Image (cartoon, grey):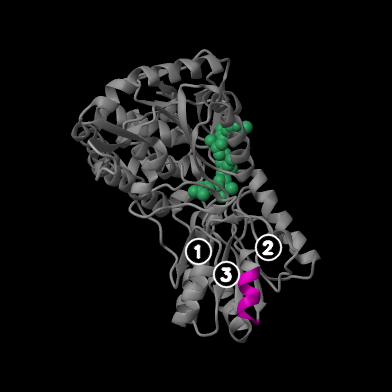
Amino acid sequence: MPSLAILQKTNLSELDDPRLFREFAYVDGAWTAGSGEGGIVVVDPASGSRIGTVPKLTADDAEKAIAAAHAAFSGWSLRPAEERRAILRNWHGLVLQAKDDLARLMVQEQGKPLSEARGEIDYAASFIDFYADEAVRLNVETVTSHLPDADMQVMRQPVGVAALVTPWNFPAAMLTRKAAAALAAGCTIVAHPSSETPFSALALAELAERAGFPSGVFNVLTGSAATVVGAMTKSPLVRALSFTGSTEIGRLLYEQSAPTIKRLIMELGGHAPFIAFADCDLDGAVDRAISAKFATSGQDCLAANRFYIERPIYERFVAAFAERVRAMTVGEGMTDPDIGPLINGRAVAKQQQHVTDALERGARLVTGGKIASAGPNFYEPTVLADVPADAAIFREETFGPVAAFAPFDDEAEVLRQANHTETGLVAYLHTSDPARIARFSRGLEFGMVAVNRTKITGAPVPFGGVKQAGLAREGSRHGMEAYTDLKYICRDLG
Ligand code: NAP
């Protein structure tokens, strides 16, 4: 089987379950090459070698897939919620059973360190588990009538076909966070995974098929995003669109969705501030700063991009952080280093551009600052100190392993600097002063605030941003809202 030979060639040991590696799209319960010419070659970002090819579906193929999802909708949505829960539970169990293979596939196409890939599979599975149970809790409420002789009911109903568009940095978890919520609500889905990392989504589709999702309910469409996602946004049959990716593409899809008034969920870019006051636990804050910056090699929308440290601890903080960074390992994901490859050459160029720009504006290079010896897609974990506010790295998301520091003297000033962004996704605060925690919890213009810790996300809590960081929420019961409409029924009793 050529696909396995390729996996072996690129040093990935053979998958325990070879059928998880699929070089086809999954439409209406069948694996298909579509009708497009050629395919999209997927490469290992560590070595640049070819992993495999996925089909380039045409707009016509995408429309047929949407029609299949639409045809499957009434059967799926009318099934008793317990049956939807049972199938989601099957899927959850199969994903956990296949964890090693799914993690290896992810390392191969995404590059992230193996232990992070394994962690992502657990995280991905947790959304399926959570929403399996939520399927039976889509409540029906009754209302005490304000009208004479009337009986009132409010129910939530699934909207129909949901389009899911996912990025390459969390190729499994971003799919399950969307798909599990939509499927639990009773929607059917057409998903487009990033062409950089389609194989994780296709493996999840294989497991979904085994779990018992009926034909047409779960579809994964590979191909040029402009073509495939363009067909989704254009289609009046697609009622909801959930997108995770850059703000730029989010804006485009928002516009494309306007003519058909789609329900939108958008999880867009981040540009997180990390604020540490002199009264914080310095060692703990440094540990958390490392984790907030370097998870997924810095390619994380939650990655801390701007470190503001109160002046009395500034030099000590930067020195302790840099010491940890100098000890970091950089290498191919299967060797489980601290830092893996970046996704492609454009990502590497962006690191270099942000470093050069900061240095030209007077920043100090503490460590790193160049392409790593492991290969052209690897960038050294880097620390920049005394970064001026007008440097590019303080104005836009870096999405890589470069940490930028600046001192501050005043609480109001640092709050203003932290809020000086349109991408209000997450902010990190380190202080032991309860009154300050209360002031910042209110004052930080972000959808999520992490106080004296970094790991804050999970299936039961709402994930999302304010301002131009996005729309609506994923995770928690709120993550099902955009996949459902409220219906009010008033019956006359007269
Ligand atoms: P991206 O370029 O916006 O791509 C995201 C998705 O959109 C991919 O499936 C991509 O497909 C598709 N796409 C690209 N161009 C398109 C077009 N013209 N029409 C329709 N779809 C299109 O973003 P990315 O580079 O993959 O991801 C990085 C960004 O995502 C960062 O800004 C990061 O902060 C953000 N992100 C946010 C969250 C969150 O939850 N807030 C989580 C993770 C990432 P192709 O890859 O096939 O082009």
Tell me where residue 12 sits by quadrant: top left
Label at residue 326? 3
Q: Which span is picked out in magenta?
A: 409-416
Label at residue 108? none
The secondary element bearing badge 3 is classed as helix
**Residue 487: % across, % down:** 34, 34
Give me the residue at 44% from left, 43% from top. Answer: 174
| Left or right: 241 in relation to 224 | left
Q: Relative to 159, is 397 above or below? A: below
Query: Which callout, 1 or 2, points to the residue nearer the camera?
Result: 2
Going from N to C along the chain, the mark reached first, 3 or 2, is 3
Tell me where residue 228 sits by quadrant: top right
Give me the residue at 59% from left, 44% from top. Answer: 246
Label at residue 292? 1
**Residue 401: % across, % down:** 59, 59
User: What is the CA distance from the residue labelled 3 to the residue labelled 2?
Assistant: 23 Å
Which of the four quarters of the rendered structure image does ligand 1 lie in?
top right
Q: Which amino acid type corresponds to the residue marked 1 in the rendered image?
A: Ala
